[in-house]
């Protein structure tokens, strides 16, 4: 028998019972559910990561839909429990859904939502922040100041890397990778090399046009290159940012061998998923190459770091906050709630999950659709017109 978990309830007499495993930013998502006759139950248990048993207790005997988090293990056990409670809707409040067994959800006919379209710029900005923090040793320098060690200007004090004119490498030039590439090219006049199975024509056109603009103004133009392999990016770039999804093919994509191909003074950024890098190999590489720097938002065994990583001065580490801007997090909460609500109401799936502006417009009711259902096809859900 699962132990009861504490909750906060909105609209107790609502017809549909929707559970959120965490309190989420903003209030619009709650209002949208309440207006559509939902009883909203938010878990208030003082525990960062809920166990499967905690979530089973939250689901209870009758539950129409659940909004969950990327830290939770949504597999056979939870989808079976949700289905038994009459639920047909689940949404991660995240764009990534490697914590969800979509096949298990399909088996129980549960729609799985995610929240693309609101994270792009926010995540790219964090990758850019980590790039600058690592290049200019901001965290080390901050610690030095606070420790009272600053005795005056010195020629060698915290010398880092100049980005201008160097090459930024992007692995995975989808929405976030492309936004990051544009920021680094436009903001710091870096040349671009990227690897992606698909050609990013828009990105290439942007860099070409910006290069022409710089040239017309008497400045060194920026350039781009689409690499034939990921290794080519690792070998040639001075700053590399990883933007693949995590699956079997990208697990430990950056391993010992690939780290050794990179320039000794290169900077590696990861805001995708921790297991894309072999973190044990990374710690060894950081120890052996003090001029190599890394900026990490994600870790293999979150919330933990592999032994030794926290001691490395050449690592900047932040706690999985790439999507943590107020606008993005409120938008993610809204999209997750609308995914669940839409399925409960029998709405179709939105045709382009990356064009979610109509759902985020606070001055108009959202479209009668589910913003992003990853298994819409598998469940043969109807698709709305834009
Ligand atoms: C965050 O990591 C997300 O996938 O949304």
Image (cartoon, helix red, strand yellow):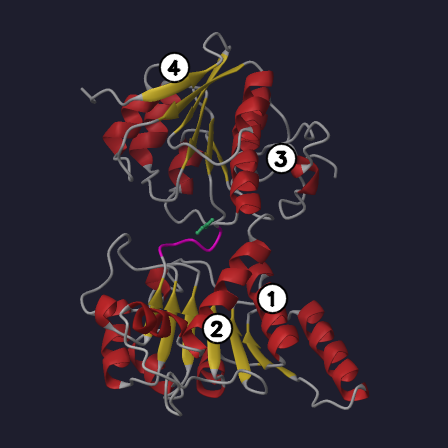
Location of residue 142 with respect to 8 vertically, above or below = below
Which circle, 2 or 4, is nearer the viewer?
2
Which one is nearer the viewer's eye here, 232 or 44?
44
Per the image, the residue denoted by label 2 is: 132
The first of marks 2 and 4 along the sequence is: 4
Quadrant (top left, top right, bottom left, bottom right) of the C terminus: top right
Confirm or deny contact between disc 1 and disc 3 (CB under 8 A): no
Q: Position of residue 27 (x, y in %)?
A: 53, 29
Left or right, 32 with reference to 92? right
Majority secondary structure in the magenta region: loop
Per the image, the residue denoted by label 3 is: 349
Left or right, 10 with reference to 120? left
Q: Position of residue 193 (x, y in %)?
A: 57, 80
Which circle, 1 or 3, is nearer the viewer?
1
Which one is nearer the viewer's eye here, 97 or 142?
142
Per the image, the residue denoted by label 1 is: 178
The first of marks 2 and 3 along the sequence is: 2
Location of residue 21 with respect to 330 vertically, above or below = above
């Amino acid at each position: 028998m699962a132990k009861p978990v504490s909750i906060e309830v909105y609209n107790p007499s609502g017809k549909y019972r929707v559970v959120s495993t965490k309190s989420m930013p903003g209030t619009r998502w709650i209002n949208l559910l309440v207006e559509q006759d939902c009883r909203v139950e938010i878990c208030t248990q003082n525990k960062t990561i809920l166990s499967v048993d905690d979530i089973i207790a939250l689901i209870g005997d009758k539950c129409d839909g659940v909004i969950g988090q990327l830290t939770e293990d949504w597999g056979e056990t939870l989808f079976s429990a949700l289905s038994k409670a009459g639920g047909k809707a689940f949404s991660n409040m995240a764009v990534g859904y490697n914590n969800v067994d979509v096949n298990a959800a399909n088996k129980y006919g549960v729609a799985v939502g995610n929240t693309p379209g609101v994270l792009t710029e926010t995540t790219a900005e964090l990758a850019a922040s980590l790039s600058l923090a690592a290049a200019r040793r901001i965290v080390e320098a901050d610690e030095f100041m606070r420790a009272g060690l600053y005795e005056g200007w010195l020629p060698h004090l915290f010398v880092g890397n100049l980005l201008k004119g160097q090459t930024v490498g992007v692995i995975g030039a989808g929405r976030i990778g492309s936004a990051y590439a544009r920021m680094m090219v436009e903001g710091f006049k870096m040349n671009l090399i990227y690897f992606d199975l698909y050609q990013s024509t828009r990105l290439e056109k942007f860099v070409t046009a910006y290069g022409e603009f710089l040239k017309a103004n008497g400045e060194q133009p920026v350039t781009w290159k689409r690499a034939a392999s990921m290794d080519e990016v690792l070998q040639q770039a001075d700053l590399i940012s990883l933007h693949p999804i995590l699956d079997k093919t990208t697990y430990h994509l950056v391993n010992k061998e690939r780290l050794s191909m990179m320039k000794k003074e290169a900077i590696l950024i990861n805001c995708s998923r921790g297991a894309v890098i072999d973190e044990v190999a990374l710690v060894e590489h950081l120890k052996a190459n003090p001029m190599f720097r890394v900026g990490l938002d994600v870790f293999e065994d979150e919330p933990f770091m592999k032994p030794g990583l926290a001691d490395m001065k050449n690592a900047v580490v932040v706690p999985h906050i790439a999507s943590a801007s107020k606008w993005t997090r409120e938008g993610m909460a809204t999209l997750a709630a609308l995914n669940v609500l839409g399925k409960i109401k029998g709405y179709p799936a939105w045709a382009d999950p990356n064009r979610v502006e109509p759902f985020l417009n606070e001055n108009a009711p959202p479209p009668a659709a589910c913003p992003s259902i990853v298994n819409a096809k598998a469940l043969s859900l109807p698709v709305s017109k834009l």
